[in-house]
Image (spheres, rainbow, N blue to C red):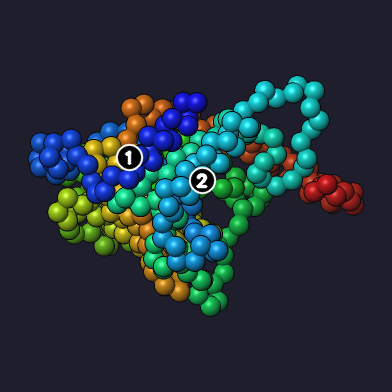
Amino acid sequence: MKTHLFTASALTLGLLAGPVFAQDGDIPRTSWGVPDFQGYWRNNTVMPFQRSQELGTQRAFTPEEAARLEQQAQAAVEEDNEPLDPNRPAPEARALPPVGNYDLFWTDRGMFLPTIDGEYRTSAIIDPPNGRIPERVAGFTPSFSRSDDGPEGRALGERCLLSFGSSSGPVMTPVMYNSHFQINQSPGYVVITVEMIHDARIIPITTMRDEERSAIHKKWMGDSIGRWEGDTLVVETKNYNPWQTYMGASTENLTVIETFRFEDDNKLIYGFTVDDPTVYSAQWSGEMPITRMDEPVYEYACHEGNYGIIGILAGARRLEVMQEMGIEREIQQ
């Protein structure tokens, strides 16, 4: 019942046109005069990152369509929240998701659809107009895949080096849980600390990048510099650590432009433009809502991958021994 009441309230608020601020349009500001983004935020939402192809160029849902989308997401969690039968059979062996490890009770994918400038967006991507990532360029080949040769071949998230998915970005996108982060500011820096794993983006406010240093010392999440354009924070990021990939592609030539702006006291609009002519046939852009929350972020204490790696590598070595001995087995069954 509480969930449905909140949905109704969210829809009512979403119908308000334009930004709403506490004091006659004044946005919160720091003591040095720039917009004060400091606090705890979340970006999980039921809004798809890419638009469903059948929607074509439909940029926004109607309020009724948005309500149905929220209700479907909430109903899925409620249905999956029934107590598990301790005598249930083993889950069917298949690729993720799901294999019985996480049910929807343990995930936090978002169940609501905050508006952006009064619209219930059908996708985060708004350019191209079809709301979808452009085609890859001719001759594109995916980046290297994971291997079991050693720990260095496993995913960065498994090794507790970087957030799963693109939680810390850029582009900062929600994942199945822990889509929370904290923003801190000083006159010369903005720091975004992501709850998933332990990532912290340190963004100097400057108009000049040390190009030589940036090209040599390539960092996780890239080298970011920020500037203020009016009340919008603009962040440009490039020169990523070569181990970091984005959507299955190398980040060697990737540049991301992000924007952060207030829509109201409790909502930021996060914009992004992705540019990599060696991967995509065109630039692409989008926006996502970021909503304020009262709860602090917590230590993720990443360790699951550390234990899992032992089993993964031990299993791989055992398989190699079996193959050398001529023992054939259908591992995937």
Q: Is residue 297 left or right of residue 331?
A: left
Measured along the vertical axis of the image, is residue 298 above or below residue 66? above
Badge 2 marks a residue whose secondary structure is helix
Q: Which residue is mark 1?
A: 13
Q: Position of residue 127 (x, y in %)?
A: 39, 66
Give the residue at x 29% y 51%.
117
Give the residue at x 63% y 39%.
309
Q: Is residue 183 left or right of residue 98?
A: left
Q: Which residue is mark 2?
A: 69
What's under tag 2, amino acid-wise? Leu
Q: CA distance from mark 1 to mark 2?
A: 17 Å
Q: Position of residue 318 (x, y in %)?
A: 78, 43
Give the residue at x 50% y 26%.
1
Give the residue at x 10% y 36%.
31
What's under tag 1, amino acid-wise? Leu
Q: Is residue 38 left or right of residue 34?
A: right
**Residue 74: assigned label:** none
Which is more N-terminal, label 2 or label 1? 1
Q: Position of residue 152 (x, y in %)?
A: 57, 48
Kindly indicate whether the residue at mark 2 contacts the one at mark 1 (C-beta within 8 angstroms).
Answer: no
Q: Residue furthest left?
A: 32
Mark 1 Cα shell of 10 Å, populated few (<14), some (14-19), many (≥20): some
Badge 1 marks a residue whose secondary structure is helix
Q: Residue furthest front?
A: 64
Mark 2 Cα shell of 10 Å, populated few (<14), some (14-19), many (≥20): some
Residue 202 visible in the picture: no
